[in-house]
Image (tube, rainbow, N blue to C red):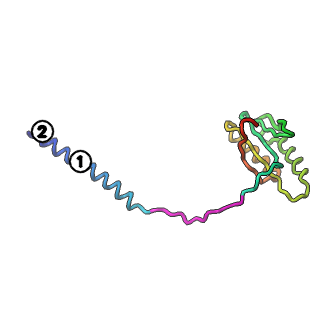
Amino acid sequence: MTGFRAAIVAAAVLGFSALALIAYAGLTWLLKPRVVSTMPMISLPMPEVTDDAFPIHIDADGVVCTTVDKQRVVLDEDPMVSELPGLRESIRRYKSGLGDAGNPPMVRIDADDKVAMQRVIDVLNALAAEDVSNVAFIKLSDES
């Protein structure tokens, strides 16, 4: 009978401990202070991506190309060359073609999902070096 009594006492202690743990967790959740952000939301106007934006495509293997008259034109093939001279020269020609119309140059980047992030950064660095700041990331359908 002593073993039975010890088992009942042990069960009561464990049950009470479990109940106390649940009550503690519930009370601390209810009583913890709520953090409310007082930071104002910033809303920046999004530039409209137009059809005359310079298209840049980055393939999965890091090849940077563009499209001219619906034809793929390779600008830089070697993913180890981060300066992207072909892209920079094409951007210079694109900007000179805009003339003094007052339109800032706009670029659309379509990067493959599997491209190394460093290659996307290389493209952004090349655009920054050519003073291009209106950049939009787009995802073209697989058919184009």
**Which mark is drawn over residue 15?**
1
Task: Please name the amino acid that badge 1 sits on.
Answer: Gly
* Residue 40 within the magenta-colored segment of the rendering: yes
**42 sits to left or right of 130:** left
* Magenta-colored segment: predominant secondary structure: loop
Can residue 128 be seen?
A: no
Image coords of residue 117 (percent x, y): 68, 41
**Which mark is drawn over residue 3?**
2
Task: Please name the amino acid that badge 2 sits on.
Answer: Gly
Disc 2 residue crowd, few under 14, some 14–19, many 20+, Cα 10 Å = few
Q: Residue at x 28, y 48 (%)?
A: 18
In the picture shown, does residue 92 fall above or below 143? below
Q: Residue at x 89, y 58 (%)?
A: 101
Image coords of residue 91 (percent x, y): 85, 47
**Magenta-drawn segment:** 34-45
| Quadrant showing the C terminus | top right
* Residue 55 within the magenta-colored segment of the rendering: no
Mark 2 residue element: helix
Tag 1 or tag 2, which sits nearer the N-term?
2
**Which mark is drawn over residue 43?**
none
Can residue 53 be seen?
A: yes
